[in-house]
Image: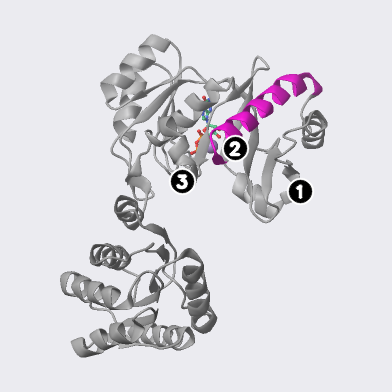
Amino acid sequence: MKLHEYQSKFLFREFGIPIPDGQVARTPDEAHEIASQLGEAVVVKAQVHVGGRGKAGGVKLARDADEARQFAADILGMDIKGLTVEQVLIDPAAAIQQEIYLAITNDRAAGCPLIMSSMEGGMDIEELNRERPEAIIRERIDPSLGLQNFQLTYIASAMGMPRARWRSFGSILRSLYRCYSESDAELAEINPLVITGGGELLAVDGKVIIDDNALFRQPKLAAQRDASGEPESERLAREAGITFIKLDGQIGCMVNGAGLAMTTMDMTKLYGDADGIGPANFLDIGGGASPEQVAAALRIILSDAKVRCVLINIFGGITRCDEVADGILTAYNEVKPNVPMVIRLQGTNASEGNAIISQARMPNIASAETLTQAAQMAVAAAKEQA
Ligand code: GDP
Ligand code: MN
């Protein structure tokens, strides 16, 4: 779950990271009010869940409160990469001497937190990462030991942080690491962390992503969710209690069990990759697979316009395949998909389940016996629909 810039920075502040003393406005008049209270030049910043707001015109420097009102009027309602700006952050403008990049993220391959930092932070960090990756210092943290003092020293010196700033940089990095760990974040990023004209360090921008699986123990953070930037399908899935991750392929997968769901995705990729065809989603319908769940899952899968075929792969353990088949037909009649569907039912009452499907004689439903068959049929159907 993504936090907005202001939410991220307010969270940083709780962990002792210095941030500008700003507030959020939803109207130009509120922006004016906040700016006049601050009584100095301010930045007006769009709060939307996308990066690169600066380049898109979503960050503007205002000399006074009147200009802040004007810029807020320009930015509120603006469309940035498909998202409408509904609130702006009004921060006192920082006098920037240097922009630093500082982030902690999950290094999935190494299975530990990774610190990335660079003296060349700011709006071109992606470009820097592509063209001169060595300008970004990377340091892994052993999660059982935590961030060590020698690592702080190493990072500050390797990135070229001026000596006089080491102490305050070290304390910010420590705080950011605590923030990252204690908030169950998968990303805690400050870009830019600035050195001001007065030599102070200040987190001017912030981006925090919380691990969805940890939200149950982060109620304060969970309450801050703004779903407007999320794919519609992921919102529907969350509401239906279905584990769903949207991907870029064409074959919508409905599977019970996370492992079988992964295998099913792998198989569509194995047979489809050469033709650019792959899974459109990860979906674990969970135990039971009741008609209501199947219908919800089907609706979620079909809400993605890219889907050209639905592959249903159910292994009946406690779940009975005949019940699942009934569920599929109920869902089918309700949702009326116009894309081909391939169904594989195995396990408890599989033959009864398959009989129900074949007796229904739905023109765009085909049954498969093995997963290999099912994946090949789904890939072929998706190709035909292209
Ligand atoms: P992003 O483009 O979405 O990452 O938004 P940022 O908050 O990082 O702002 C983009 C850029 O605007 C920064 O890299 C700075 O160069 C500039 N900027 C942001 N806040 C201030 C500020 O308070 N003072 C000045 N002078 N520039 C700022
Ligand atoms: Mn930024």
Which is more foreground, mark 1 or mark 3?
3
- The tag earlier along the polypeptide, 1 or 3, is 1
- The tag earlier along the polypeptide, 1 or 2, is 2
Looking at the image, which residue sits at the far left? 334
Residue assigned mark 3: 212
Residue assigned mark 2: 122
**Foreground residue among 144 and 315:** 315
- Res. 199 image quadrant: top right
What distance separates the C-alpha of mark 1 from that of mark 3?
Answer: 32 Å
What percent of the width, then of the height, locates residue 227? 34, 44
- Which residue is drawn at the image coordinates 69% and 38% (left, top)? 117
Q: Secondary structure at mark 1?
A: helix
- Res. 349 image quadrant: bottom left
Instruction: Kindly indicate whether the residue at mark 3 contacts the one at mark 2 (C-beta within 8 angstroms).
Output: no
Q: Is residue 235 above or below residue 64?
A: below
What percent of the width, then of the height, locates residue 103? 63, 38
Question: Where's the C terminus, which quadrant?
Answer: bottom left
Q: Residues within 10 Å of mark 3 (few under 14, many from 20)?
A: some
Q: Is residue 86 left or right of residue 270?
A: left
Question: Which residues, given as a range, are shown in magenta?
Answer: 163-186
The amino acid on which the numbered mark 3 sits, given as a three-letter code, is Asp
- Which residue is drawn at the image coordinates 50% and 44% (left, top)? 211
Report if residue 221 is visible in the image.
Answer: yes
Q: Is residue 13 left or right of residue 170?
A: left
Question: Where's the N terminus, which quadrant?
Answer: top left
Residue assigned mark 1: 134
**Foreground residue among 345 and 149:** 345
Specify how the rendered protein is coloured: one colour
What distance separates the C-alpha of mark 1 from that of mark 2?
Answer: 16 Å
The residue at label 2 has a CB less than 8 Å from ligand 1: yes
Q: Secondary structure at mark 3?
A: helix
**Foreground residue among 20 and 233:** 233
